[in-house]
Image (cartoon, rainbow, N blue to C red):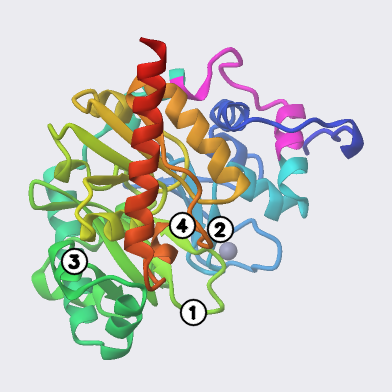
Amino acid sequence: MLSPHRASNERRELSREEIDAIRARHPIEQVVSQYADLHPSSRLLQARCPLPGHDDTGPSFTVYVQSQSFYCFGCNRGGDVFKFIQLMEHVGFRDAVDKLEGSSIVVEPTRTARQKEQANPRSRRVLDEDACHLLTAAAEVYHASLLLNDRMLNYVIGRGITMEIIKRFRLGYAIGTNLAKYFRFRGWDLQLGKDLGLVGDHGEFFRERIIIPGWQHGNAIYLVGRKTKGYQQVKYLGLPGAAKPLYGLEGVIRLREVFIVEGCFDMLTLVQWGYPAVALLGSHLKAEWEQALAFAARIFVVTDSDEAGRVSAKTIAETFGARSIIVPPLPNAKDVNELALQPKGREHFAQLVSQARHAREGERERRV
Ligand SMILES: [Zn+2]
């Protein structure tokens, strides 16, 4: 169905921007529709699952145009357009990229991901009142479940997160069986929960995951689910039916200094240590977030310690120019949350920040 790709030894590395641009050129609904009959259902597109190994009887397979992702509630596989091609065609990431680029499903070939993001009003769509209401209720159901579950509560505390933060951010746990029951009990339309991607015909999207909600004006606007079980392949899942927000933005508005981190547990750790922090939930900084942080005079960039983290720190710092300060890689820790588990983690972090700050001030003085 898709054309053959070039041999792997001719290929060069692709930058993050190039990968984003390729993703943006291939709307997932168009790619999936080459393999399955997608039918609109409320605000979603659904189909019988076309993935190998799943003999689907229902329409278990859902495409979320909003977040450009898919998820099958039958075989529990999901991801973006690259992941779809990887699963469909039994190939690795890079081959999936080449297959897409070599295919005929090319739309808007001159646009970059960022231009598309700005041009597409749906990507900036705010959840409507009903969706916000339902999502907030779901977050509260999950929060109550966490407080009642000693094992999971200890697990979160074991990640270095205090009870105070658990309650302030209303962290939760998805048992996986009580959301639909609760919605029915309240007399709410379950379809809305399906539109958001919270529930499918085969159960809850976030089952057996720690839930970290994103908040705005007292309403949950997004959920992230962290894996707790070995069988769960994806470490962090984002709510499919809503646009990803900049986590923690509400807490830093109009502050002089802001710390940007990658993961939501990193953000929670820094907030707990008294730093004003926001999380990208990945490494990509959306153009609208760049504008949202216009008030900050100093932006500290704290990424994961690996090579990918270093690359994304540079990219983010370049975006903010002279306002940005990169905090050097964390000693013996993959990320801030892991640093929090070390006896002197907090002190080490404070040292790194002050080193980075002084290095920058020294640079300025030398220039004068
Ligand atoms: Zn499936």
Q: CA distance from mark 2 to mark 4?
A: 39 Å
Counting from the top left corner in percent of width and height, residue 40 is at: 41, 44
N-terminal of the two: label 3 or label 1?
3
Amino acid tagged 2: Arg
For residue 38, side relative to residue 142 (left or right) = right
Image quadrant of ligand 1?
Answer: bottom right
Q: Is residue 226 visible?
A: yes
Amino acid tagged 1: Lys
N-terminal of the two: label 1 or label 2?
2
Span of residues in magenta? 97-114
Whether the magenta-drawn stretch holds residue 135 is answered as no
Q: Residue at x 43, y 59 (%)?
A: 237
Q: Is residue 176 visible?
A: no
Q: CA distance from mark 3 to mark 4?
A: 19 Å
Q: CA distance from mark 3 to mark 1?
A: 23 Å
**Which residue is tagged 4?**
335
N-terminal of the two: label 2 or label 3?
2
Amino acid tagged 4: Asp
**What mark, if any, has residue 48 been given in the picture?**
2
Counting from the top left corner in percent of width and height, residue 144 is at: 16, 78
Residue lying furthest top: 368
